[in-house]
Image (tube, rainbow, N blue to C red):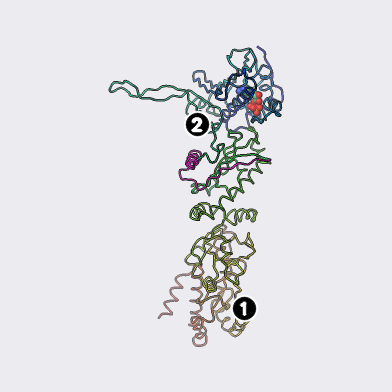
Amino acid sequence: MEKMQFKAESKRLLDMMINSIYTNQEIFLREIISNASDAMDKLAYTALTDHKVGLNRDDFSITITRDEANRTLTVSDNGIGMSREEMEENLGTICKSGSLSFKQEMEKQDDIDIIGQFGVGFYSAFMVASPVTVISKKYGEDTAWKWVSDGAEGYTIEQAQRDAAGTDIIMTLKADSEEGEYSRFLDEYELRNLIKRYSDYIRYPIRMEVTKQRKKDDCTEGENAYEEYTEWETLNSMVPLWHRNKKDVTQEEYDSFYREKFFDYSKPLCTIHTSAEGSVSFKALLYVPGKAPYDYYSKEFKAGLQLYSSGVMIMEHCEELLPEHFRFVRGIVDTQDISLNISREMLQHNRQLTIISRNIEKKIKAELKSLLEKDREKYEQFFAAFGRQLKYSTVAEYGAHKDATQDLLLFRSHKQGKLITLHEYVESMAEGQTKIYYVPGENRERLAKLPQVETLSKRGYDTLLFTEDVDEFIPQYLYTYEEKQFCNAATEDLNLQTEEEKKELEQKAEELKGFLTFVKESLGDAVKEVKLSANLGSHPVAMVPEMGMSFEMEKYMKKANPEFAFPVGRILELNPEHEAVKALERAMTEDPIKAKDYAELLMYQAQLMADLPIEDPAAYTELVCKLMK
Ligand code: ADP
C-alpha cells in the first residue's frame, strides 16, 4: 500500500470546495452518477471500434447500493474504469480532467458529448462522506486498484479485486451533525427522489434494490395479507422529453410532465418545445402556466428555468436564462455548451447563457403574440394572470424592455367595451384623431361617464380606461406608440377645438371674467383656478388637476409613499353653455349669498365626478338641505 499526499494547491482547493461551492450537499450524488455516466460513455465509444469490449449500449448501467449497517452508499458502474496512474492523476489532482484529455484524444473522430471539464465533481463526495473509497478496473487491464482518502491530507492506493472493468465509489457517510443529516442518503425514498430530481435523464439506467409490497398467494384469515419483498428497479426515465422529436410527443405528455415537474395541477396555457443549433446549441421545453402561483407577486417566488447540461440538471432556478418580463415562464433548457461544474458566479457572466436567453425571449414573445392573434380567449386568461407583470416590466428600468412587452399589453376600450391592444387602438382611430386617449381611475363604469370621455366619444374617439395603478405610468415610458402620442383626457387639454372655437372661448372668458373671479373667491383655497372649458359635453363642471400630475397619481403616492405625497392643485372647469352654470351666473347678481352656495355645490359635484374624496361630507349634505329649503 502506498501513501500519497494531495498536492498543496489541491488541498487548498479541496478545502475551499467542501466549504463553499456546493451549499447543496445533496448534489454529490448527481456528480458521482454523472461521472459514472461519463465513464460508460467512454467505454461505449471504445466499443464502437473495439469488439473485444463485448458490451452493447443497453448493457451499461449504474447501480446504487445502500448498506445501513456500515453506513456506506456505493455507486457502481461498468464503464471504462481507471488505471493506477489515472487514479493518481484524476483523483489526486484537482482540476486535472481525465475527460478533457479523453475528449482531446477523440476530438477528430466524432462528437461524443462528455460533460464536466472542471474536474471538481468527484470531490463533492467529501461533503457528505469520509472516507471515500474508489475501487476501479480499467478496461483492458488485469489489475484493479483501490484508492482511499479521508479528503484531508492525502490518499492511499493498493491493489484490489474487481471482476470486470468499471468503478465502485464507496462513500462512508459522515455522522449526523449540525452541518448535515447525512443518514438521509441511506434512505431509499430520499435516494429515489434525488435521482428523479437531478439525474432522471441520465441515459443509462440507474438501478437500486427497492422494497415493495405484494399480496401473499396463500394466506390464512386474520393474517396480514401483504408481504414485503425487494426488487431491482430502474429509477430514472432516461429519455428526456425535450430530447424527443416534437411530433412524437403528445400534448398529454407535455401536460403531465409539466404537472409532475412543476407541481402545478392546472393545465399550462402554452407549450414551447424548441431547439437551436449554431454558436450555441440547446434544447428547451417551456411552459406558460395557466394561472399565477399564489406567491407569484411576492418575494418568495423563485423565477428561472432549470438548466441541464447534457441531460444532467445543474441548476434548478437559473434566472440568467429568462428575462424578468417573462419570469412567469417555467421550463427546462438543456445545452452541451455549459460545463457541469460551472459555478453560479461564473454563470452570471456566461456568454452562452446570454445567447440562449435572447433566443428564448424571442420564442416566448412570438408564442404569446401568436396566442394573442389566434386565441383571444386564452390570451385574456393569460393576461389576467400575468398582465400585471408585463405592465410592470414595461415601466421597469425606465422602459428599457418596452420593446419586448408593449405589443402584448391589453387595456379596456371604452368604445369597444373589451380589452384591446395598443395596436388595435391605433388601427381603429377615427379620422382626424391624432392621439391615444386614456383616463386613469379605479372604477371602469365611473371613468366611462367622465365628461371628457363623453366629449371624445361624441367625435368617435375611443378612450382607454386605465384602472390599474401601474397603467398610468405606461405612457410616460412609452412616450408614443406607433408614432401616436398619449393624452391623459382627464388632465390634459384635449385640444379638439378649431382655432375659431378657441378664440370664441377666450372671448367668452373675457366677457365672464367677473363671474369667474366671483366663483374663485367664493371657493377660496379649495381650488387653485376657475376657468371655462369646451370639453364638458352635457356636464356642467369638471375638476382637473394642475399640469403634470393627476389625481390618480396623488392617490397612488398617498398609498405608496405618504411622506412624499402632496396634494395636486385643483382646477374647476365650467361649461358656460350648461343651465346650472347659467343659473349660478344669474344668482351672482340676484342673490350673491345663494350664488356662493351654488358655486360650492358645483365644486362638490366636480369632485364626485373626478372620484375625489369629499373632505367634509357633513358640510356637503347641510348645503344640499339648505338649498332645498
Ligand atoms: P470531471 O468529471 O469534471 O472531470 P471529477 O472530479 O468529477 O471531474 O472527476 C475527475 C476524473 O476522475 C474524471 O474526469 C474521470 O477521469 C475520473 N473519474 C471519476 N469518476 C469515475 C468513474 N466512475 N469511472 C472512471 N473514471 C472516473
Rendering coords of residue 186 (x, y %) = 50, 24
Rendering coords of residue 562 (x, y %) = 56, 59
Give, as a three-letter code, the residue at label 1: Thr
Query: What's the residue at 58%, 16% (across, down)?
Result: 164
- Label 2 to label 1: alpha-carbon separation: 74 Å
Give, as a three-letter code, the residue at label 2: Asn
Rendering coords of residue 65 (x, y %) = 52, 21
> Judging from the image, what secondary structure is the residue with disc 1 in?
loop
Q: Quickly name the residue at label 2.
A: 193
Label of residue 31 in the image: none
Where 532 falls versus 7 (above or below)? below
Q: Quickly name the residue at label 1.
A: 498
Of discs 2 and 1, which sits in the foreground?
A: 1
Region of the chain picked out in magenta, as a range? 250-278
Q: Between residues 265 and 59, which one lies in front from this camera angle?
A: 59
Give left or right: position of 600 versus 20.
left
Q: How many marks?
A: 2
